[in-house]
Image (cartoon, rainbow, N blue to C red):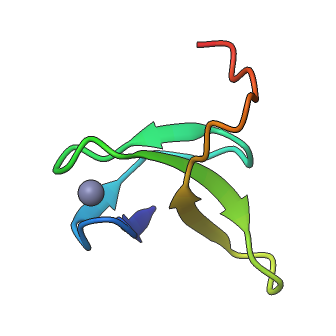
């Protein structure tokens, strides 16, 4: 699957994604969370660390 990094607009390619997974952008190093939009499509959004434990 291919995504655009919301931070740097770079291309990110992954084999498969799971909702809630965190992906690091290879270009800018941003941590991106896999989410679903209202069409049920996977999208990447910047992962906020608001006291959430992502469990490394
Ligand atoms: Zn990026």
Is residue 29 toward the left or the right of residue 42 in the image?
Answer: left
Ligand 1's quadrant is bottom left
Counting from the top left corner in percent of width and height, residue 34 is at: 62, 53
Q: Quadrant of the N terminus?
A: bottom left
Q: Name the quadrant containing residue 15.
A: top left
Seen from the viewer's position, the closer of residues 53 and 33 is: 53
- Residue located farthest toward the left when viewing the structure as drawn: 27
Residue lying at 21% horizontally and 67% vertically, measured from the top left: 10
- Give above or below for 3 relative to 13: below
Residue lying at 69% horizontally and 44% vertically, measured from the top left: 18
Seen from the viewer's position, the closer of residues 52 and 17 is: 52
Q: Quadrant of the C terminus?
A: top right
Counting from the top left corner in percent of width and height, residue 55 is at: 68, 13
- Give above or below for 36 relative to 49: below
- Residue located farthest toward the front when viewing the structure as drawn: 50
Q: Name the quadrant containing residue 52.
A: top right
- Residue located farthest toward the top when viewing the structure as drawn: 56
């Amino acid at each position: 699957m291919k995504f655009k990094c919301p931070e740097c607009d770079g291309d990110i390619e992954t084999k498969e994604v799971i909702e809630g997974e965190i992906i690091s952008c290879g270009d800018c190093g941003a941590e991106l969370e896999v989410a679903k939009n209202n069409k049920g499509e996977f999208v990447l959004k910047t992962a906020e660390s608001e006291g959430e434990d992502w469990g490394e």
